[in-house]
Amino acid sequence: MAVQPARQVESGGETQSFQDPARENAIQLVAQGRRTFRFDTFGDESFWGGTLMLHQAIEGAKLGGVGPGVSPRTALAVGLKVDVDALPANLVAALNHGQVNLADPATTLALLKLNAVVGVTGFFNSSGTLQSVGIQCALCHSTVDNSMPQLCAGAIQPNPGTGCIGHRMDGWSNRDLNVGAIISLAPDLSVLANLLNTDQATVRSVLGAWGPGKFDAELTLDGKAFNPQQMTDGVVTTTNVSGATLIPPAFGLGGVNLHTWTGWGSIPHWNAFVANLEMHGKGRFWDPRLNNAAQFPIAAANGFGDLPHIDPDSDLITSKLQALQFYQLAIPSPQPPAGSFDVAAAARGDALFSGKAQCNNCHVEPLWTDAGWNLHTASEICIDDFQANRAPDQRYRTAPIGDLFTHFKGGFYHDGRFATLNEVVNHYNTCMSLGLTASEENDLIQYLLSLTFGPKTSSSHSSKAASGSHQQ
């Protein structure tokens, strides 16, 4: 049996040595999970490169691919991020001095060779040409800080608190990432067109409607690209809204029962779902709920609920789910920035949250979601049931509402229907007949801005944390 390493601790002035296998195991799992989260494609390059030929669009015709190619400026404009810690010091200096051509696709290839594009891996031939490309969890659920803000100039206005080229921030939802636009760069979308029983032009139109920070995980299950009638508080607010939903954070997951906007399942269930069905990695997946042809006609027709049994040595997903979940649970939650909310007003909002506003009935402290089965019907929260009906339980999840400052861009609720927190609180005031005054609404909003999943530092509000909405 392997001997666990001993640890030295100070106790009563004496140094004691003992073994702590749980701690050592945790350290190992976090390291493994971080590698998977940041760098593992699960073999999905066979789809993104082999099937969609996305790598050819990245290269461009001048470098052996097709079209104009994808320059760093274009990549940044669609929300891709660059890890500054993967760059050599001389390149960082050149970037800061404007000596790097950010309009040249060759620069993008150089960044891929350095493994510096967050969530994307390039696979190169011996000759140096791009052979394929794959994606990782970090593509959607990581971003970078704004330590080099000047390098976003002219490309994109990033989500507040984030940048274009900087240090990784795992767990943050990339609300700048235009997944639909990225997929549309691929020269061949016939596999998606055939799956959806339509043409490539229609697929590109659907993808173009997603917009930054959104993804439609159910599109290839039910084919429902648009919500025909969005309703809030009994009023039709708009029609034919894209079925794509906002990318959620991957931190603050501890103690939360069901995940995703509509409560599809646990963390490992959704990781397996995404790795197999959305990223198109190579693994084994089982979810018989997808055999419901009335609800998921495309998934049922294509056997998505019971992916082929494969040899464990060929399964590039299942063995990594344990460590991946462990790492996601270990990602520390960021703290609300000092000065980002009114402390006195937040203290008043605290009392409202668990009192008159009734928020704590569902957003239970300190999980900020239901302590148990965290799903509710659309009628309970006075909105349409379009998105709820695209999930097995046909309900909406009580979204955990800590650290909202990390994803202001794109709006609130699953589809971003509320542009501001004021609109969210107004909605609940109407829906639940709370009778909140304008002053009370403001206090509640300030409390909302103080929320965090993690232990609060001196820069955070010293009282409790929460808010007033089932959705984020």
Image (cartoon, rainbow, N blue to C red):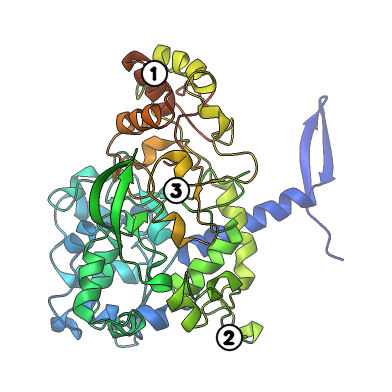
Dot 3, crowdedness within 10 Å: few (<14), some or many (≥20)? Answer: many
Mark 2 highlights which residue? Answer: 308
Instruction: Estimate the spatial distance between the alpha carbons at disc 2 and disc 1, rounded to whole Å.
Output: 54 Å
Q: Nearer the viewer, residue 365 or 141?
A: 365
Residue 288 image point, x, y percent = 60, 73
Please, what is the three-letter code of the amino acid marked with disc 3? Pro
Q: Which mark is residue 436?
A: 1
Q: Can residue 428 be seen in this snapshot?
A: yes
How many numbered tags mark residues here? 3
Residue 135 image point, x, y percent = 40, 69
Q: Tell which tag, 2 or 1, sits nearer the viewer.
A: 1
Q: Which mark is residue 336?
A: none
Residue 300 image point, x, y percent = 50, 79
Dot 1, crowdedness within 10 Å: few (<14), some or many (≥20)? Answer: some
Q: Can residue 455 be seen in this snapshot?
A: no
Residue 413 image point, x, y percent = 38, 44
Instruction: Estimate the spatial distance between the alpha carbons at disc 1 and disc 3, rounded to whole Å.
Output: 30 Å
Please, what is the three-letter code of the amino acid marked with disc 2? Pro
Q: Tell which tag, 2 or 3, sits nearer the viewer.
A: 2
* 274 over 395 or under it: above or below: below
Nearest to N terminus: mark 1 or mark 3: 3
Quarter of the picture holding the C terminus: top left
Mark 3 highlights which residue? Answer: 249
Q: Is residue 99 left or right of residue 129?
A: left
